[in-house]
Amino acid sequence: DPIQAPEFKSCSEARDVQSGDVLDVNCCPPPSENIVDFKLPPVHRMRVRPAAHKVTKEYLAKFEEAIRRMKALDKDDPTDPRGFMQQANIHCAYCNGAHDQVGFKDLDIQVHNSWLFFPFHRWYLYFYEKILGKLIDDPTFVLPFWNWDNPKGMQMPRIFDNPRSPLFNTNRNQDNRPPAMIDLGFSGATEDLQKVVNNLSSMYSEMIRSVNSTIDFMGQPYRAGNSPSPGMGSSERGSHIAAHVFVGNPKNRYMEDMGNFYSAGRDTLFYSHHANVDRMWSIWKTLKTDVPKDLTDPDYLNASFLFYDENKQLVRVKVRDCLDHRRLGYEFEPVDTPWLNYRP
Ligand code: C2O
């Protein structure tokens, strides 16, 4: 059977996944008895998510204003599920053992390390983006993606590194602020040029060379009654983790913010990082390789989650409804993907 959406009323404490320590944070969402099933929205015009290193001034002003308002909600009403901390806590609740599997009190829901990884984060960003749009009265609002797979995007995007911006976060690795370059394949390279080469070849590897089955890319099957974390796909294990480790502050106990599940969503950069992870999934599906690009297992397709939408309505979503991002009304600004032809 599929993993079912959690019951918010049985949400309990959060733990650090590695150590098992109980975390000093209550990340349970406000409960609600009123749940509606998601319906695909009519798509009139595609919203295009831009690359973060290329955004216009006008766009940046909107994005900053939306984040400012989302952070203001925390003060106005800390129980508003659209507030910045409430949104960050979604990640904590679904990833640090706060939500149990329905019918299996002793088994946590864990949305990483399995085939739920891509769909869960796609839905999470979908609602996050809708909320930001609502807060600035712009239903066309889109999140920017951190284009770390392109040499021009291989550092933290500058828009996140301005101390006067609401996008700024002090809980990052200070040594890795721009122009420090990311190391996507944990190669240990020290020269920037060598990092670029290694990054492109590790992208080629996680997207193509090391992917011999759908599961290799998507992650292992995870069904109701299974122990959490059956195994990651190549993208989750590679570039995805690399960016978390790059940004998280090693001076903090749990590498907050980006270096731990419970706190990752407190960094505005998290959502742009995941927008690129989401983009990688969409690109992978277009690759002309022999591997089938869609999982057809009903336990995958019918897995479900709960999110509050931009009107504070609790919505039940299924994996099957997010498989084509265009049907959710967005796509990505086209940018070069030099790793595509980067056979080592
Ligand atoms: Cu849910 Cu990148 O972590």
Image: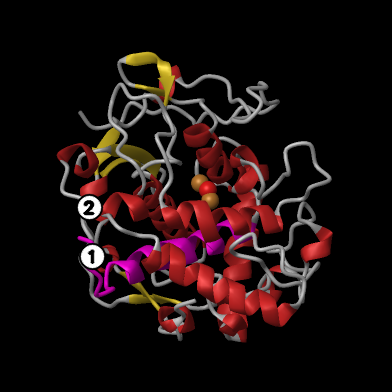
The quadrant where residue 158 appears: bottom right
Kind of element beneath mark 1: helix
The residues colored magenta run 268-292
- Kind of residue sitting beneath label 2: Asp
How far apart marks 1 and 2 lie (CA) works out to: 8 Å
* Tag of residue 321: 2
Q: Would residue 147 be visible to someone looking at this image?
A: no
Q: Who is closer to the viewer here, 182 or 263?
A: 182
Q: Quadrant of the N terminus?
A: top left
Q: Does the numbered disc 1 mark a residue whose Cβ is under 8 Å from ligand 1?
A: no
In terms of image quadrants, where is residue 280?
A: bottom left
- In the image, taking residue 291 as reference, residue 100 lies left or right, namely right
Where residue 220 sits in the image (x, y, percent)? 34, 41
Q: Residues within 10 Å of mark 1 (few under 14, many from 20)?
A: some
- Residue 259 lies, with reference to residue 26, above or below; the image says below
Residue type, label 1: Arg
Q: Which residue is mark 1?
A: 327
Q: Is residue 261 left or right of residue 141?
A: right
Residue 15 spot, x, y in % from top left: 61, 25
Residue drawn at point x = 40 percent, y = 61 percent: 210
Answer with mark 1 or mark 2, whichever residue precedes in sequence.
Answer: 2
**Mark 2 neighbour class, 10 Å CA radius: few under 14, some 14 to 19, many 20 or more:** some
The mark found on residue 124 in the picture is none
